[in-house]
Image (cartoon, rainbow, N blue to C red):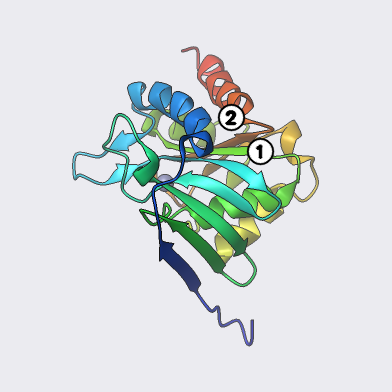
Amino acid sequence: MIDGVIKYDFQFTKSEPLSVENYLEIESVRERLYDLNLIGVTKEGIGFGNISRRIDANSFVITGTQTGHLAKLSGEHYSLVEEYNDKEFYLKSSGSIKPSSEALTHGIIYNLSSKIGAVIHIHSKEIWNFMLTHDYLKTKAVEYGSVEMIDEVNRIFSNIEPLSNPKFVMAGHEDGVMVFGEDLVGAELVLMGILEEMGK
Ligand SMILES: [Zn+2]
């Protein structure tokens, strides 16, 4: 980074669909969240929501871009992020589809702690409003996928162990909420916990 100029370098190599062991766990969580309309498609036809699970230190599997309208996904709808560097805005992926445009935000979260094994991003007006008006971690009104978002995620977790409070609301990304956990089941439980706090 020179003089604050960010080089975006998102490389994608089209390859065979991912094999089922890469996404089987994601798929079972995703089906439940799709049924709750926490992952889906807006009236305007824009897909929302994405899920990832860590493969190793610097790689993860994530749902592909614009797959929100699909009730069930298979190998061609998932993407493997092989390498990333949030500070350099570098992300290298492969699969039959490009990763979700929010993949780098998932990467920022994985970088918070090596113990984080799964990240879920959902959209919900109700949950978003609830979290913004209650005592939850919040990123300021910055765009997702921006340098400011990287700084914001690091800022809100600068003084706490991330897994002790693995959820935050994105003030600058309408309806956007992120939860994470040591694994997918754990991340889903965090989300269900918020619904419980809402009295759902
Ligand atoms: Zn979003």
Asked if labels 2 and 1 touch by Cβ distance under 8 angstroms, the answer is: yes
- Residue 75 position, x and y percent, is 39, 41
Q: Is the CB–ligand 1 distance for label 1 below 8 Å?
A: no
Label 1 or label 2, whichever comes before in sequence order = 1
For the N terminus, give its image quadrant. Answer: bottom right
Q: Is residue 43 left or right of residue 34?
A: left
Identified by mark 1, the residue type is Gly
Residue farthest toward the left in the current orientation of the protein: 44
Element carrying mark 2: helix
Residue occupying the far bottom of the picture = 3
In this orientation, which residue lies closer to the viewer: 53 or 178? Answer: 53
Q: Name the residue furthest top.
A: 199
User: Could you give the CA–CA distance between mark 1 and mark 2, rounded to whole angstroms?
Assistant: 7 Å
Residue 124 shown left or right of residue 136 in the figure: left
- State the residue at coordinates (44%, 65%): 12
Q: Position of residue 70 (x, y in %)?
A: 28, 35
Task: Give residue 163's position: percent from left, percent from top.
Answer: 73, 35
Q: Residues within 10 Å of mark 1 (few under 14, many from 20)?
A: many
Q: Is residue 95 above or below residue 31?
A: below
Q: Nearer the viewer, residue 61 or 19?
A: 19
The residue labelled by disc 1 is 117
How many residues crowd around disc 2 within 10 Å: few (fewer than 14), some, or many (20 or more)?
A: many
Tell me the residue at 49%/60% (across/down): 93
* 58 with respect to 39 (left or right): right
Q: Secondary structure at mark 1?
A: loop
In this rendering, is residue 136 above or below 113? above
Q: Which residue is labeled 2 in the image?
A: 184
Residue 114 visible somewhere in the drawing: yes
**Looking at the image, residue 34 lies above or below residue 140:** above
Amino acid type, residue under disc 2 in the picture: Leu
Q: Quadrant of residue 91?
A: bottom right
> Does residue 197 sit above or below 183 in this rendering?
above
